Image (tube, rainbow, N blue to C red):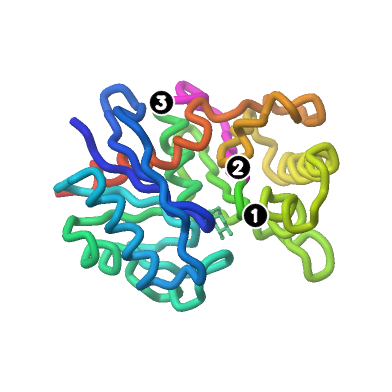
Amino acid sequence: MNILGIDVGASGIKGALVSLEKGQLSGERYRVPTPQPATPEAMAEAFAEIVQFFNYKGPVGCGFPAIVKNGVACSAANIDHNWIGKDIQKVFGDACGCPVYATNDADAAGVAEMRFGMGRDNNGLVLLVTIGTGLGSALFYKGVLIPNTELGHLNWKKNVNAEQWCSSGARSRLKISRKEWANRFNKYLNHLELLFSPDMFILGGGESKYFDQFKGQLKTNALVVPAKQLNNAGIIGAAAFAFENHG
Ligand code: BGC
């Protein structure tokens, strides 16, 4: 069975059909740039364009870059502030004509990796960090998700949170080299390790495809691995979320 998963990001909105038996994409991804400003209206159009591209009818899973409670956006770090308090499932569902099920994007990626990827069979404490425009986090203990952890928003320095210091977005905005960025990111992982003592870190998001270039700079006690599905984990987890929540 193929379910459409859509990973809504601050820079791009990516969708693909997902085989939940195999835990992988069953075809090509289709990506549209996230409209700027990323208002509910403009993003709904882009979301509907993806659903139309696949000529899809059925439940659609959506990973969304904000705190998501019962389908409602409760924060808006890298998207338009008009999202706060909006029912994501209704805004996107009305635009595309399909039932939409929304969850936090990093939580979606985490669920995919725990079920089908690097966290499979890990019964300890696993922390997935997505590195993209923002920094997302998904925390699991004995396979159970503690949702909306938002560890990218840990206060880091005066008036600077971790995401503003060591996300991929920060790397481009501050024009720092990948080497300097990895040095920062290592410090961030070390801080997370001090707080949570995870058994494993899984790195997802756009930056995870460069893992080989920076893994040598990461010095933690816990194992650090790239997500098996790299940046596609969010799409797969979104599809799984829709499948589970669709009546
Ligand atoms: C948001 C998180 C999101 C992360 C990755 C952060 O700015 O607050 O909700 O998971 O970006 O998109």
Horizontal side of residue 242 vs 104, given as left or right: left
Residue drawn at x 28%, y 54% as measured from the top left: 101
Q: Which residues are magenta?
A: 117-131
Which element is circle 1 on?
A: helix
The kind of residue tagged 1 is: Gly
Residue under pointer 1: 152
Callouts 2 and 1 close, C-beta under 8 Å:
yes
Is ligand 1 within 8 Å of the beta carbon of the residue shown at mark 1? Answer: yes
Residue under pointer 3: 116
Task: From the top left corner, tell me how far across and down residue 131 is, in percent.
Answer: 62, 44
Q: CA distance from mark 3 to mark 2?
A: 17 Å
Task: From the top left corner, tell me how far across and down residue 72 is, in percent.
Answer: 37, 67
Q: Pick whichever, 179 or 63, lies toward us.
A: 179
Q: CA distance from mark 2 to mark 1?
A: 8 Å
Q: CA distance from mark 3 to mark 1?
A: 24 Å
Residue drawn at x 54%, y 30% as measured from the top left: 227
Which element is circle 2 on?
A: strand
Residue under pointer 2: 129
Task: From the top left corner, tell me how far across and down residue 39 is, in percent.
Answer: 44, 72
Q: Quadrant of ligand 1?
A: bottom right
Which element is circle 3 on?
A: helix
